[in-house]
Amino acid sequence: MRGTDGDAKPLRALLIDDDPDALLFMRDVLDRRGGMDVATAGDAETALRSLDGVDVVVTDVEMPGMTGLELLTRIRAARPDQPVVVVTAHPSLDYAVEALRGQAAEFLRKPLDPAELLRVVTDLGRTAREAAAAARHVVLAVGAHPDDVEIGVGGLLSAHAARGDEIAIVTLTRGARGGTTATREDESRAAARMLGARLFLEDGEDTRLPVNDPTLSAVQRVIEEVRPQTVYVHSFHDLHQDHRAVHQATMVAARKVPTIACYQSPSATVDFKPNRFVGIDDYVERKLDLLACFGSQVKTRDYLESEVIVATARYWSRYGGGRYTEPLEVVRDRTDAMPVVEER
Ligand SMILES: [Zn+2]
């Protein structure tokens, strides 16, 4: 687990106080001594507009306009997990302080002890980052060729992206048989960018992918790097030998991944037998946009025609809900992590 050490981004603190000297003092401690990225605000209203990307908020209580107490309540409502440190010069007389104690992550008295301030903010920031990292869901889509995963789970990946999941795509060949590799690489990158996905483009031999190395170790390497909770991959029920090889290699490489499901390719056989149907009504257009990235293929491959893509999703909706559906053969599901899942 990365904290604030090494190459991780420095912690970001937002300091709020109407006293410029107090701000200067706190900034000095957290920035110069703590190496943090520090933003400041002289009032609560400004602070509320500056919360994006902030790990820890440190606020004074006694301020004109909105007080630190009201600010804390507002932050709690919008960001329940945001750590807030409350600072006051008058702990004894302030009846509100008792109320604050329950909501504030920490409570410090002025004059501030620099070492204590630094320790409290650092601990809270690290804990918050670790919790956020633990809650993040990582999805890996594995395909033999450029455009395979977009055809199979383009809608589903768009749904994962919309809910903030981290997405990675590994493509085992650069598609030399289907056009120039440079074009197909660019196309793959454009689609990955649209999804906000990390793309791993391997150099396997198109149409001759082996089940064992280098396919197996390539998938294994990516899994070790991105640590997915969910993997989507080709079905074994597929006429294309590369698709079957990638399926088999991924079954081995992803043996410790909690959830694995297989998608349908245009070359899937009648033995493709999905048992999970994911509604993609809101993401059909997005799926078509993704596939439009593969311009060099759209002209020559009729399975990439919008009509075929939409009609296929429409067909599978007879087993799922809504109008458009992507079908999956679930090999194993220990996380319940797919968005909008409809059981047959
Ligand atoms: Zn393929």
Image: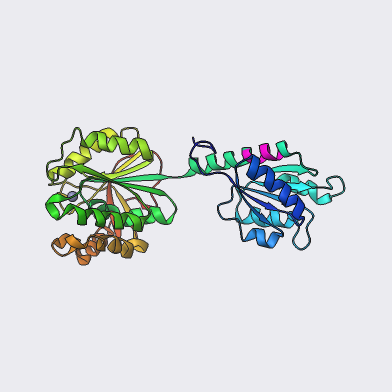
Give the percent coordinates (x, y) of residue 244. Answer: 17, 41
Residue at 68% x, 45% y: name it.
28
Q: Nearer the viewer, residue 216 or 334?
A: 216
User: Which portion, as a residue range, is magenta?
Assistant: 116-122
Quarter assignment of residue 224: top left
Figure coloring: rainbow
From the viewer's perspective, tell me whether residue 301 is left or right of residue 330.
left
Residue 199 shows in this picture: yes
Residue 320 shows in this picture: no
Q: Is residue 238 above or below residue 214?
A: below
State yes or no: residue 244 in magenta: no
Residue at 19% x, 47% y: name it.
272
Give the percent coordinates (x, y) of residue 261. Answer: 29, 44
Residue at 26% x, 51% y: name it.
149
State yes or no: residue 119 in magenta: yes
Quarter assignment of residue 242: top left
From the viewer's perspective, tell me whether residue 23 is left or right of residue 291.
right
Residue at 21% x, 44% y: name it.
235
From the viewer's perspective, tell me whether residue 105 is left or right of residue 141.
right
